[in-house]
Image (cartoon, grey):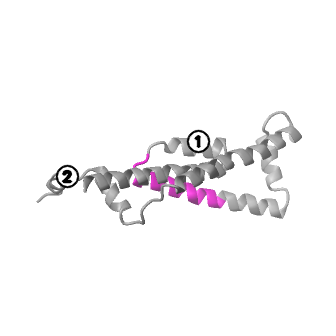
Amino acid sequence: MTPASNKAVSGSSDETTVAAVVNTASPPSPWLQWVYLALAVSGAIFPWLANAEFIRDYGQAFDLAQFIELANANPAARSLSRDLLIGATAVTIWIISEARRLKMRGLWIVLLGSVTIAFAFAAPFFLFMRERRLLEISRKSLEET
């Protein structure tokens, strides 16, 4: 039997393939998506409150050069800035990979939100979307059995 006929015989689709990969993990928790959404909202509000304070204190516009300078003003600030940069880079790579693996829609919202709102918004928002996708895949695989 050829790989194409195997796919046709088993009724397999990309969705079924994704479901097979996902079913090896623990089942998704319906309530967890709401925890992630609450964290995403907090991750949008609190950094932007600080950004608004920065704009108020340092000029009428968001001066990126001044912001970066202040983010590196002392060893503690440099530590936090570098920690966020490296951690956010690693998590963003995982987000892109995971979104492709699960064939998720809306990745552009997460990536755009990461640079326009805050990474503290984007990462939990991705996790919210991921939980919803895992629940969707789980429901579809239960319907097929």
**Towards the viewer: 131 or 78:** 131
Q: Amino acid at mark 2?
A: Gly
Query: SS class of the residue under badge 2?
Result: loop
Residue 89 colored magenta?
yes
Residue 35 lies, in percent from the top left, at 59, 54
Q: Is residue 19 left or right of residue 116?
A: left
Dominant SS in magenta: helix
Span colored in magenta: 86-104
Q: Amino acid at mark 1?
A: Leu
Q: Is residue 131 left or right of residue 14?
A: right
- In the drawing, what numbered circle is on residue 11? 2
Q: CA distance from mark 2 to mark 1?
A: 37 Å
Q: Where is mark 1, residue-wise?
A: 112
Residue drawn 42% across the image and 54% down it: 134
The mark lying in front, picked from 2 and 1, is 2
Residue drawn 16% across the image and 57% down it: 6
Which of marks 1 and 2 precedes in the sequence?
A: 2
Q: Is residue 66 depicted above or below 87 in this figure? A: above
- In the drawing, what numbered circle is on residue 139? none
Q: Is residue 102 left or right of residue 111?
A: left
**Towards the viewer: 56 or 31:** 31
Residue at the far front: name it.
31
- In which quadrant will I find the C terminus? bottom left
Residue 119 lies, in percent from the top left, at 64, 50
Would you say residue 117 is visible in this rendering?
A: yes
Would you say residue 119 is visible in this rendering?
A: no
- In which quadrant will I find the N terminus? bottom left
Q: How dense is the environment of label 1, judged by Cα within 10 Å: few (below 14), some, or many (20 and up)?
A: few
